[in-house]
Every structure is written in structure tokens, then in C-alpha cells.
């Protein structure tokens, strides 16, 4: 199993596979902007080995034009940098367990970080594709990573309501703090959805679909 993770020596690793790790709070407090090697890592399965030049994101569903976007294609689009906090929904899970049993890794308070995220606004990508718009529509994302068998063994996928997808701060992201994304943080492309739990900022983006229901709904 390919694992390109370059572990900071002080990261607290909750599990090697899937890789889940967080920084100790003193290191997190050292800088207002969290360095890439100290940003928490949340994985549901493998960390895919992707070729930044060859990888394509398939944009389809309820669109006028299907797109097959490379990292280079996204980088030449007008860019936007958004300073935003990313936080795992399981942050401070031991505090929850003190009240009632809950599933998941025992994240302390370090599954959070602040960064400058740079990418093309997702709204611009959807505009190029001629995506339909409407309050009842959703934009679904599929990652190149595969979940553990206990989580279904399928490619990871989440969605956003169209209104959130069209927000100017929602990005098809390729850089963190001015640096290309590291493998463990979604290289070559991920979604960054500020203000929503980190699970709504999927990594290793491979497909985008405009559809009439959220991911997992039937």
C-alpha cells in the first residue's frame, strides 16, 4: 500500500491505516497559519498515488458540457485565495465520550488548522461546464481514495447543496499556504468548503457530478 506521508516527528498518530494524525497543541499554537506538515491528516482508506500531470477530474451529471480537467487546466483559471479553518467533525471526541459512547478515532483538540487555500472557485468550474442551477440540486464529489472494507470499500464521496457549491469561497483547491498540496492533503486537487466540517472538503478529487440528490440518497 502506497503511503507517501512524511510524518512530522511530533504528530500524534491515531492509526497508520487509514492514516489519522494530529499535531500536539503547543505546535499548533506556534503559528496562526498551520504548516502543511502539521495539519491534521484524516483518511478513510488508502492515500492514492496520483500523477499530477496525468490525473483528470471528470465533471458531469446535469451539465451542458462534460469536462475532463487536469491540474494544469485548473491552475490557468482565475484563482482565489481564502484564509479558512479546516476542522474534523470528530475533533475533541474524548470530550464527547465522557458524556456518551461514540465511534471513531480519539481525536484530541488538534484535528483543526488554519491555512491560506488557493484554487479556482468551484462556481467558475461549474459555469464552464454549463451546470444547471437550482435550490434542489447538489454537487457530488468522488475521491480517488478507497474506503476500508468496514466503511463499504467504495471510493469516498460527499456532496454539497448547490448554494454552497456556488459560494465564491468554495474552491477547487491546489495549494495550501502558497505550496502545492502534499499527498496526504489531497494532491493534486481537492475541494475546500470553508465553514463546513472537513469531511465536506474531499481530497484526491476524481469526479464532480451535478445531480438532484445528495450523495448517498436514493
Image: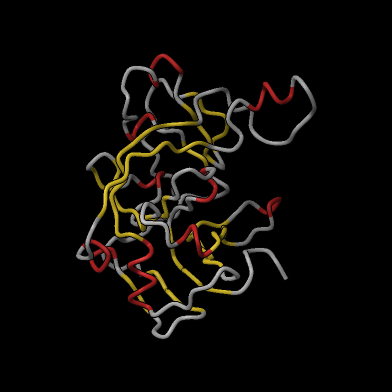
Q: Is residue 142 visible?
A: yes
Tell whether 80 sits left or right of 126. left
* Closer to us: 166 or 61: 166
Residue 185 against residue 49 in the figure, above or below? above
Quadrant of the rendered structure where residue 10 is?
top left
Q: Is residue 188 above or below residue 89?
A: below
How is this picture coloured? secondary structure
Foreground: 10 or 191? Answer: 191
Task: Specify whether 21 is left or right of 176.
Answer: right
Q: Of all residues shown, which one is farthest toward the left?
A: 76
Q: Residue at x 33, y 17 (%)?
A: 30
Looking at this view, name the residue that lies furthest to the bottom.
64
**Where is the C terminus found, in terms of image quarters?**
bottom right
Q: In screen coordinates, is 128 left or right of 153?
A: left
In percent of the image, x 38 and y 22: which residue is there? 9
Residue at left offset 63%, top offset 51%: 148
Q: Position of residue 205 (x, y in %)?
A: 43, 60
Total marks placed: 0
Residue 173 percent location from the top left of the image = 34, 54
Q: Nearer the viewer, residue 3 or 73?
A: 73
Q: Residue at x 42, y 85 (%)?
A: 64
Where residue 48 appears, x then y in whole percent? 44, 55
Across and down, in percent, residue 165 comes to 46, 61
Give the residue furthest to the right. Answer: 100
The answer to whether 190 is drawn above or below residue 185 in the figure is below
Quarter of the image where one finds residue 185: top left
**Residue 1 visible in the shown view:** no
Task: Name the residue furthest top.
Answer: 26
Say left or right for 96 vs 197.
Answer: right
Amino acid at each position: 500500500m502506497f503511503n507517501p506521508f512524511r510524518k512530522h516527528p511530533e504528530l500524534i498518530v491515531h492509526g497508520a491505516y487509514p492514516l489519522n494524525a494530529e499535531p500536539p497543541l503547543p505546535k499548533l499554537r506556534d503559528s496562526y497559519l498551520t504548516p502543511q506538515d502539521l495539519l491534521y491528516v484524516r483518511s478513510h482508506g488508502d492515500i492514492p498515488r496520483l500523477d499530477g500531470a496525468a490525473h483528470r477530474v471528470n465533471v458531469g451529471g446535469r451539465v451542458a458540457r462534460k469536462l475532463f480537467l487536469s491540474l494544469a487546466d485548473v491552475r490557468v483559471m482565475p484563482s482565489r485565495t481564502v484564509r479558512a479553518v479546516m476542522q474534523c467533525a470528530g475533533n475533541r471526541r474524548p470530550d464527547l465520550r465522557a458524556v456518551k459512547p461514540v465511534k471513531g478515532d480519539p481525536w484530541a483538540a488538534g484535528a483543526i488548522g488554519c491555512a491560506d487555500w488557493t484554487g479556482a472557485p468551484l462556481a467558475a468550474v461549474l459555469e464552464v461546464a454549463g451546470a444547471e442551477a437550482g435550490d434542489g440540486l447538489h454537487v457530488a464529489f468522488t475521491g480517488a481514495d478507497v474506503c476500508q472494507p468496514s466503511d463499504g470499500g467504495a471510493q469516498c464521496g460527499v456532496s454539497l447543496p448547490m448554494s454552497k457549491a456556488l459560494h465564491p469561497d468554495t474552491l477547487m483547491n491546489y495549494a495550501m499556504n502558497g505550496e502545492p498540496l502534499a499527498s496526504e492533503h489531497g494532491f493534486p486537487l481537492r475541494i475546500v468548503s470553508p465553514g463546513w466540517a472537513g469531511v465536506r472538503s474531499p481530497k484526491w478529487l476524481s469526479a464532480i457530478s451535478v445531480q438532484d440528490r445528495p450523495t448517498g440518497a436514493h
